[in-house]
Image: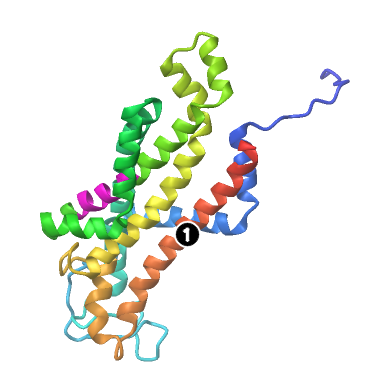
């Protein structure tokens, strides 16, 4: 016979569970999360499921409209460009060039910015002041403009785009983490932990960082959307991916000449950029709303 429970025990949700409950209550945030998961799958398996190679040309299928148009065909679901290349296949092959590269760039910038921002945030006096003013000078330049300047010096190409966008986004991580750690360092609970015998490393990881993760998560989501836009913008300006690379921004630039006769060559890759950035911003906004009650 199972034991009888006399007292009702309330199950208290963990902080992570409460964040998920608050996040899942937002349908727009969930839609953005599912979209990001779909983009991740395309990044990993897109080239495997693409019906055509990204550079394959079909002279018999020049500027075919999408399949829902009476003149379109199911074989070319999203139509073709002026060289007869399948747009759907090029979008699938490009998922890892735009979305995947944006994730890799942000991860690199996050690790670099976290190390520099954490060390500078724990400093005091002249060192902290000099680094703070230096970061203010770097942040006065928009990330896209800084990326254009770096690419102009290093030359066009996807490898240089990686370093250009990474250099442009790293100061944002350094500044946000530096400011958050420096502000938390002035709180009374940090003084109490220091009086309790905790060393600097313990204070940083166990006392300060639990209150800084919110800033890191939100800054990461903002940086991913900014990285996608910067990569696409550099590709559009012919400073990033070079033809015939199926990068979304480069696809928009290549379809500009046929905008009036074949608008799908511009709108379809443009919509891919739009939905990617929108999904990331929805997830970031949902995380901000979900973390706010936990922090308060």
Q: Tell me what residue is drawn at x 29 percent, y 86 percent.
A: 259
Residue 126, percent across and down? 33, 28
Q: Residues within 10 Å of mark 1 (few under 14, many from 20)?
A: many
Q: Which residue is mark 1?
A: 279
- Where the C terminus falls, by quadrant? top right
- Where the N terminus falls, by quadrant? top right
In the image, taking residue 73 as reference, residue 20 lies left or right, namely right
In the image, taking residue 158 as reference, residue 223 lies left or right, namely right
Of residues 273 and 193, the one drawn nearer to the viewer in this rendering: 193
Magenta span covers which residues? 161-171
Tell me if residue 271 comes above or below residue 23 in the rendering.
below
**Element class at badge 1:** helix
Tell me if residue 133 comes above or below residue 248 in the rendering.
above
- Residue 262: image quadrant is bottom left
Query: Residue pushed farthest top?
Result: 197
Q: Tell me what residue is drawn at x 55 percent, y 48 percent.
A: 288
Q: Tell me what residue is drawn at x 42 percent, y 84 percent.
A: 68
- Determine the main secondary structure of the stretch shown in magenta: helix
- Say if the magenta span includes residue 167: yes
In the image, taking residue 41 as reference, residue 61 lies left or right, namely left
Q: Which color scheme is applied?
A: rainbow
- Say if the magenta span includes residue 18: no
Residue 264, percent across and down? 34, 81
Is residue 173 among what the camera can see? yes
Q: Tell me what residue is drawn at x 56 percent, y 55 percent.
A: 29
Query: Residue pushed farthest right?
Result: 6
Residue 284, percent across and down? 50, 51
Of residues 173 and 9, the one drawn nearer to the viewer in this rendering: 173
Q: How many marks?
A: 1
Query: Residue pushed farthest front?
Result: 126
- Residue 8: image quadrant is top right
């Amino acid at each position: 016979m199972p034991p009888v429970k006399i007292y009702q025990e309330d199950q208290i949700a963990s902080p992570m569970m409460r964040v998920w409950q608050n996040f899942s209550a937002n349908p727009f945030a969930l839609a953005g999360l599912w979209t990001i998961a779909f983009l991740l799958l395309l990044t990993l398996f897109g080239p495997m499921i693409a019906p055509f190679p990204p550079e394959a040309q079909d002279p018999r299928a020049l500027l075919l409209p999408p399949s829902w148009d009476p003149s379109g065909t199911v074989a070319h679901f999203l139509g073709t460009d002026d060289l007869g290349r399948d747009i759907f296949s090029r979008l699938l092959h490009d998922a890892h060039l735009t979305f995947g590269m944006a994730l890799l760039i942000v991860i690199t910038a996050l690790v670099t910015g976290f190390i520099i921002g954490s060390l500078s945030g724990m400093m005091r006096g002249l060192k902290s002041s000099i680094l703070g003013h230096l970061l203010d000078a770097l942040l006065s330049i928009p990330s896209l403009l800084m990326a254009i300047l770096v690419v102009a010096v290093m030359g066009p190409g996807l490898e240089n785009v990686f370093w250009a966008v990474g250099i442009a986004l790293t100061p944002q991580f350094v500044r946000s983490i530096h400011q958050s750690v420096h502000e938390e360092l002035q709180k009374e609970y940090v003084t109490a932990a220091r009086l309790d015998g905790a060393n600097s490393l313990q204070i940083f990881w166990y006392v300060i960082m639990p209150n800084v993760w919110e800033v890191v998560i939100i800054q990461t989501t903002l940086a991913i959307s900014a990285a996608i836009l910067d990569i696409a913008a550099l590709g559009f300006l012919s400073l990033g991916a070079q033809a015939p690379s199926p990068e979304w921004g480069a696809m928009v630039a290549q379809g500009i000449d046929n905008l009036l006769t074949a608008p799908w060559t511009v709108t379809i890759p443009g919509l891919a950029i739009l939905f990617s950035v929108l999904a990331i911003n929805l997830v970031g906004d949902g995380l901000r709303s979900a973390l706010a009650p936990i922090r308060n």
